[in-house]
Image (tube, rainbow, N blue to C red):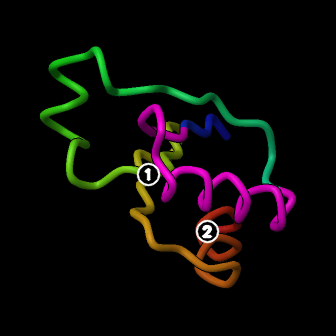
Amino acid sequence: MALILYQRDHCHLCDQALAALAAARAPAFESVFIDDDDALEARYGLRVPVLRDDARAAELDWPFDDERLRAFLHG
């Protein structure tokens, strides 16, 4: 599983997503900030935070609760 959390600097929703990931005891993930990347900004700009599982090419858009997050991680 190769998890990536796409997020922005100074993003309260991103902070909430990080807290949800910690509460769900999610496996290690990479944080990628989209602020200075035009391609990522175009793809994720209005959607962040977004959790991506690169191995499955699956994405989970915010908002996600514990149930949705656990289903995504074990799906």
The answer for how far apart the CA atoms under marks 1 and 2 are is: 19 Å
Label 1: which residue?
49
Q: Which residues are magenta?
A: 5-25
Q: Residues within 10 Å of mark 1 (few under 14, many from 20)?
A: many
Do the residues bearing badges 1 and 2 touch, measured as CB atoms within 8 Å? no
Q: Secondary structure at mark 1?
A: loop
Query: What residue is drawn where x is 45% and y is 73%?
Result: 63
The image quadrant where one finds the N terminus is top right
**In magenta segment, residue 48:** no
Q: Residue at x 43, y 66 (%)?
A: 62
Vertical relation: 68 (above or below) 6? below
Of label 1 and label 2, which has the lower sequence position? 1
Q: Is residue 12 highlighted in magenta?
A: yes
Disc 2 marks which residue?
Answer: 75
Could you tell me which residue is drawn at 61 percent across and 39 percent down? 3
Left or right: where 64 falls relative to 28:
left
Quadrant of the rendered structure where residue 39 is?
top left
* Amino acid beneath label 2: Gly
| Quarter holding residue 6 | top left
Mark 1 is on which residue type? Pro
Kind of element beneath mark 2: loop
Classify 62 as above or below 6: below
Q: Nearer the viewer, mark 1 or mark 2?
A: 1
